[in-house]
Amino acid sequence: MIPSVAPAPVAADAEDTATNAVTDTTAGARPGRRPRTAFAGLFSRRLSARRLVASPGAVAGITWLVALVVASLTAPWWLPYKTEDQDFTAVLSGPTAAHWLGTDELGRDLLSRICAAAAGTLGTSLITVIVGVGLGTILAMVAAAGVRTEGVISRATEIMMSLPGTVIILAVIGAVGTNIPVIMAILGVLISAGIYRVMLGQATALQSQLYVDAAKVDGVSALGISMRHVLPGLSNTIVVQSALIFAVGMLIQAGLAFIGFGPPIPQPSWGGMIQGASQHVYDAPWLMVPTGAVLALTVLAANAIGNALGKSPNASASHLPSAAERRRRAAASAVASPEAPAVPSPSGRLSVRGLSVGVDGGTPLVTDVSFDVGQGTVLGLVGESGCGKTMTALSLLGLLPSGVAVTGGQILWDGRNLAGAPEGVMEGVRGRDIALISQEPMRALDPMFTVGYQLVSTVRRLRGIGKAEARAEALGLLEKVGIVDAARILRTYPHQISGGMAQRVAIALALSGRPRLLVADEPTTALDVTVQAEILSLLRTLVKDTGLSVVMVTHDLGVVADICDTVAVMYAGQVVESGRTANILDNPRHPYTLALLAADPHANTAADMPERLATINGQVPQPKDWPGGCRFMARCQFAGSACVAPVPLVPSGSDDGVVRCVKADELAVEGLEWVATDVPGHRVLDVRSGDIPSGDIPSGDMRSRDNVERDKA
């Protein structure tokens, strides 16, 4: 692997580059500011006001609820009638100029009574939400933190759920009277048992995450873990459940008032008004409409707000776009990238010309990328994290994440431009002509189904053959990728096999449709060294035996040297150098390639291993910070005034290689090398002299202080 030659950027891979370009966020707290608490993160990130504004239903719901509350609280100031005023000349009347919504059986104004009852109805329903959701969430977080506690709380909630809620509420009414706040609080306690069951599974899953284990290692208390890590993860569920319980609370409150257990007469309530209207459903049907419509609209408003707030933020660039979005993107790409001329081209040849990828209507992520992949050859895309390798690879399959699209250039496959192809065409290409091997094999395997079911189903879909024939083909594919006991593996689930075995299964899935081109997105990164060698040997065999072409996305120059025929070095969304692998590795012409090789310990033999490997100061700039000239200029040891202007790709002088550097010829002639930067003197340790102050031993030293003292003795 290429060693860490710069401070790790926020974006861990090229997909994170798109995320950062869209959201422009950074990790951690800013200097001089206190870290955000769990509640701050919960209500600033998850419950973003922008999500409410973006949803017309949520905007309408908020407007409706605010209008009801304001109208209810200010009712004494503007309502033309008091709630108990009677007009015997207009009993059971419909809407008139004097009574906009009509009157009830006693001649009381419906508009006045509906508005006056709104605040009380909404407020007491909110009590149910606070008690039910709050108590259920707290119990779930406490139970998820310990097995014994979970057993006790779960048994208690099971008893609560077995109790007849209606009977308990009626018993409470008999004991304390029609005290609506108390009744709604008791209802919240009863509902909390169901909320607890909903929250427990999610809280338990969050407690098993690796970052929770890391927090425990750091000494964070159980309460701190619950507040910092578990509660923010439950935010979407809390919001959705709150909206649901709020609506249920209003309906139950109206139901109690309907059967006579509402606020005392003559105090108005929506349920009591509906009960009175039900007695005149035949002679005055309009009487049911105003109150029923207001109650229904209020329930819908609460649900609309909950739906808007409960949606997970679409910040992860790994989410694939919807079908409608892909169709819109294909139409826009067809305009930006017109179809290539219908010229004959060799079968199985990929030609990428001037490819540009960017955020929709915003920041570019990849610009002017060109390369060719001939049949039976392997191309390596190399560069640091955030250079655009994965964005380039995903664009070949039309799988760019939501919010990112091809903005220019061509992806020519068998003479067709896939950059502007509609989704129907891409569905015929994916899996059959071009297949993908993802970085994490478990992303390609569904844990709910056996390996055999997934592999056989894929073979049947892509080849259109029967089940028995597909199963035989699946066995053959597993044997082809080096799995000895193929019949047993077909019966296992993905979690029952090792990472190397899962990667072999993922390769077999990719080969199910007999593709001519494989896009391998760092297929060996998550594997140990021995399994990496086996996977690379497998890919070499497939290329040799089947004539398969491969686009290999990798950080590892050793992988490039081992398997790739050609290589394209990418930096900040551009190809800075490309050509035959031997020429690039033996005679690099771009300073960035030179620096990567100088930083790789495998690029040197034991005899000429330098005392200290080179480093590249700084980090890959974010797309919004790309300079107008050479994008590597800020980190380059050979940068000059000529690097300020835009730098085109020019022939490198070796075969058909190209390089993007104004000093490429000068560096080649003078034979300059990327030199290691000096380490501050106070950080240099002379372990041979034994003169090491105890306070100067760095925390990253693998030797213990006792070993150092033993060496000194």
Image: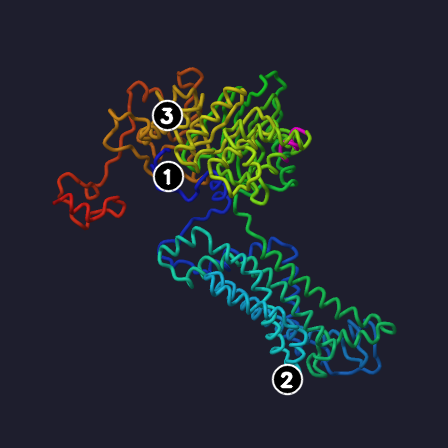
Residues under numbered marks 2 and 3 in contact, where contact means CB atoms less than 8 Å apart: no
Secondary structure under tag 3 reads: loop
Of residues 668 and 77, the one nearer the viewer is 668
Q: Name the residue under label 1.
A: 619
The residue type indicated by label 1 comes to Gln
Q: Name the residue under label 3.
A: 590
Give the side of residue 456 with respect to residue 218, left or right: right
Q: Quadrant of residue 620?
A: top left
Residue in the image at 38% along x and 31% along y: 644
- The magenta stretch is 457-464
The dot on residue 175 is: 2
Give the side of residue 117 with respect to residue 556, left or right: right
Of residues 46 and 481, the one nearer the viewer is 481
Residues under numbered marks 2 and 1 in contact, where contact means CB atoms less than 8 Å apart: no
Sequence order check, earlier mark of 2 and 3: 2
Q: Badge 3: few (under 14), some or many (20 or more) residues near its Cα, within 10 Å? A: many
Q: From the top left corner, tell me how far across and down residue 315 is, in percent.
A: 52, 47
Secondary structure under tag 2 reads: helix
Q: From the top left corner, tell me how far across and down residue 72 is, in percent.
A: 65, 74
